[in-house]
Image (tube, coloured by chain):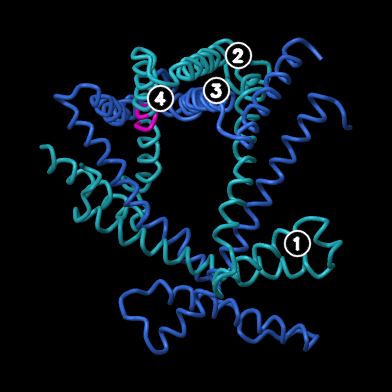
Chain colours: A cyan, B blue
């Protein structure tokens, strides 16, 4: 029951989807769409598990006065405020997306600036990591450094001011060698995904059951 | 500007400065903003997901008297799967949650087998099947396009060769994979540069917000 049933469910679901792909007629025709709906419903419940885990973790931290417990209080306040405003906007304004809803205000005043600044901050850390990784020690690192430098300079006005050919070379790199490498890597990745899917459906890969 | 707009601007500015303060070093202000972000985004995505996915797919259909009874009964299956997922809260029966996990894994695997081939691999191969001889009115353009098409095909092929591990990289395979790594490095460098620029544009956006919307020192 604990191992055999999940393996059977995985096998049946996977095989049914493959069969449905090749037999696009009732009752299998809409199976893919139906399963995707089921997946979304199950995912909705899974979200609750995640939230429970987050809240419990921080409540424990506050309860035991572990270091940084004050930040956990801030997290829980922001969490419950967002949740309450979200459901309030949903029920009172019929949609959390309504522009008059407080949920939208919260999105533009809190989530959006935090998210954008957090990602902007990454620019500095990527640059600092790149400084260590990109030092031209060998041909591969030099190629990385040169192509990154050209693409960065080619995308800003100062690059064009330095030399008008930089944007042209930058576009050439993006359209030819970059595209060729990306395509090769993607093909390899997708072939790997197919091999892994086969292993999962046939029950050879069982790590998800642990 | 009403009170909420003004308060929203000050709040956004304060949080932006708090996050940027990490550039100096890790500090309580940054940690505070970081925790606010985690809490708010977790709740945000729950509300959005339940409103956009679970409500129309489950709640609306279950409550709609026009929706066929048979279909409503079928909806019980994912609902039961969802409830099974929540059984992780009870250690004695937590193993039952493996069933919905098995369903989602099986679905992802089934889709990966078919949709990946149809949606990704075939289009990628199709997009690489360029004519190696291009003929236009201008012989120089013809030569350039032909060379570039051959260049891309060669690049894709050598990149794939680099990831071919079923045979030791010696002889011709070694040469091919060495050329492949050149393409890969140029590609990684370009993607890196592109990502940096995207992040820089976000940073410019935040700095503009602080100077324009908050402090009003620039137009």
Look at the magenta stretch and give its main secondary structure: helix
Q: Secondary structure at mark 4?
A: loop
Q: Are the numbered discs 1 and 3 placed on the same chain, yes or no?
A: no
Q: Residue at x 45, y 24 (%)?
A: B55
Q: In the rendering, at what x and y percent does residue B19 appear? A: 62, 30
Q: Residue at x 35, y 48 (%)?
A: B108
Q: Nearer the viewer, mark 4 or mark 1?
A: 1
Report crowding for label 4: few under 14, some 14 to 19, many 20 or more residues within 10 A (C-alpha). Answer: few
Q: In the rendering, at what x and y percent does residue A99 appear? A: 68, 20
Q: Which quadrant would residue A134 be assigned to in this image?
A: bottom right
- Relative placement, left or right, of A66 versus B13 is left
C-alpha span from label 1 to label 3:
38 Å
C-alpha span from label 3 to label 4:
47 Å
Instruction: Indicate whether B186 appears above or below B157.
Output: above
Residue B105 disc label:
none
State which chain disc 3 sits on. Answer: B
Q: Are the numbered discs 4 and 2 placed on the same chain, yes or no?
A: no
Report crowding for label 3: few under 14, some 14 to 19, many 20 or more residues within 10 A (C-alpha). Answer: many
The magenta stretch is: A42-46
Tag 4 residue? B67
Residue B32 disc label:
3
Q: Secondary structure at mark 1?
A: helix
Q: Are the numbered discs 2 and 1 placed on the same chain, yes or no?
A: yes
Closer to us: B4 or A9: B4
Q: Does A87 appear in magenta?
A: no
Residue A154 disc label:
1
Please report whichever mark, 2 or 1, sits nearer to the chain's N-terminal start. Answer: 2
Q: Secondary structure at mark 3?
A: helix
Q: Nearer the viewer, mark 2 or mark 1?
A: 1
Tag 2 residue? A93
State which chain disc 2 sits on. Answer: A
């Amino acid at each position: 029951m604990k191992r055999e049933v999940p393996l059977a469910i995985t096998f049946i679901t996977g095989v049914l989807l493959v069969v449905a792909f090749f037999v696009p007629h009732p009752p299998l025709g809409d199976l893919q769409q139906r399963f995707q709906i089921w997946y979304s419903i199950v995912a909705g419940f899974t979200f609750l598990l995640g939230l429970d885990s987050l809240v419990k973790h921080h409540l424990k931290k506050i309860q035991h006065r572990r270091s940084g417990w004050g930040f956990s209080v801030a997290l829980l306040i922001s969490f419950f405020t967002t949740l309450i405003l979200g459901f309030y906007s949903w029920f009172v304004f019929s949609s959390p997306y309504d522009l008059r809803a407080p949920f939208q205000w919260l999105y533009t005043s809190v989530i959006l600036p935090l998210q954008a600044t957090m990602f902007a901050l990454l620019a500095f850390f990527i640059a600092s990591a790149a400084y260590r990784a990109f030092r031209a020690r060998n041909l591969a690192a030099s190629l990385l450094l040169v192509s990154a430098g050209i693409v960065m300079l080619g995308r800003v006005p100062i690059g064009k001011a330095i030399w008008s050919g930089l944007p042209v070379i930058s576009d050439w790199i993006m359209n030819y060698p970059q595209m060729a490498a990306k395509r090769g890597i993607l093909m390899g990745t997708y072939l790997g995904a197919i091999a892994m899917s086969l292993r999962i459906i046939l029950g050879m890969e069982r790590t998800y059951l642990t | 500007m009403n009170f909420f707009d003004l308060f929203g601007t000050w709040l956004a500015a304060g949080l932006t400065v708090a996050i940027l303060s990490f550039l100096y070093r890790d500090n309580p202000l940054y940690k505070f903003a970081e925790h606010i972000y985690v809490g708010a985004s977790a709740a945000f995505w729950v509300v959005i997901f339940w409103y956009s996915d679970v409500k129309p797919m489950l709640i609306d259909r279950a409550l709609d008297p026009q929706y066929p009874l048979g279909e409503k009964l079928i909806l019980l299956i994912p609902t039961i799967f969802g409830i099974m997922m929540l059984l992780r809260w009870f250690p004695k029966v937590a193993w039952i949650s493996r069933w919905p996990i098995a369903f989602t894994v099986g679905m992802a695997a089934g889709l990966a087998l078919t949709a990946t081939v149809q949606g990704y691999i075939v289009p990628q191969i199709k997009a690489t099947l360029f004519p190696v001889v291009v003929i236009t009115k201008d012989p120089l353009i013809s030569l350039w396009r032909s060379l570039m098409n051959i260049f891309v095909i060669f690049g894709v092929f050598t990149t794939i060769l680099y990831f071919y591990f079923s045979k030791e990289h010696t002889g011709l395979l070694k040469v091919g994979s060495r050329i492949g790594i050149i393409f890969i490095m140029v590609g990684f460098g370009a993607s890196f540069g592109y990502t940096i620029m995207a992040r820089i544009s976000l940073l410019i956006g935040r700095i503009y917000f602080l100077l324009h919307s908050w402090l009003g020192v620039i137009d």
